[in-house]
Image: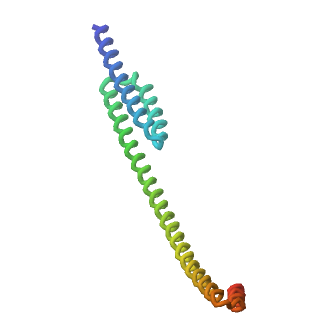
Amino acid sequence: MGLAVAAAFLTASWFNWAVLLVTIVINLIELLKQQHHRPLIVMTICFDTLVLTVFPFVDAPLQLVLTSLAGLMILITTSLIHYLFQETDMVFARSLDKMMTSYTQEVQTLYEGMRGWRHDYHDHLQTLKAYLDQQEVKEARHYLDDLEDK
């Protein structure tokens, strides 16, 4: 009789250990897929190590409760960390959008300034060309001197 109870306990214990280890491995595989969950990996390993060291010293119903609590805690913590990193990404995206908007406005201002300068440059060249077409070199030189003084 004692042997059957011991065998049943070992079987249940090994089953619980196997379920717990499979849960740990699945969680770690999922966590390793996303780099920003590395702090959660450390927490999961620490918590699971604690559960594994306490597991042999408690009875089967308490083992089930501990396993359920460990899974629930990991699920809640994973969800919370995912939410926090998602919020951090949103803040970063908003900041990047503001920077890009500012940069775009600055480029637009520079472009408008260059258009004005190009228009003025074109007008000056037209004036010089008109002076030179009429053989008025002195007036062209005077016009250039006035431009230098501005």
- What residue lies at 48% left-to-right and 39% top-to-bottom? 38
Q: Is residue 82 left or right of residue 124?
A: left
* Front residue of this view, candidates 57 and 145: 145
Asked if residue 39 is positioned above or below residue 111 in the image, the reply reads above
* Front residue of this view, candidates 58 and 112: 112
Give the colouring mode of the picture.
Answer: rainbow
Residue 90 visible to an observer of this rendering: yes
Asked if residue 84 is positioned above or below residue 126 in the image, the reply reads above
* Front residue of this view, candidates 95 and 42: 95
Asked if residue 114 is positioned above or below residue 7 in the image, the reply reads below
Q: Quadrant of the C terminus?
A: bottom right
Asked if residue 99 is positioned above or below residue 18 in the image, the reply reads below
Q: Residue 69: image x %, image y %?
A: 35, 35
Q: Residue 115: image x %, image y %?
A: 54, 77
* Front residue of this view, candidates 54 and 31: 31
In which quarter of the view is residue 23 placed? Answer: top left
Q: Residue 116: image x %, image y %?
A: 55, 80
In which quarter of the view is residue 62 placed? Answer: top left
Q: Quadrant of the N terminus?
A: top left
Residue 150 visible to an observer of this rendering: no
- What residue lies at 55% left-to-right and 80% top-to-bottom? 119
Q: Is residue 105 left or right of residue 72?
A: right
Number of numbered callouts drawn: 0
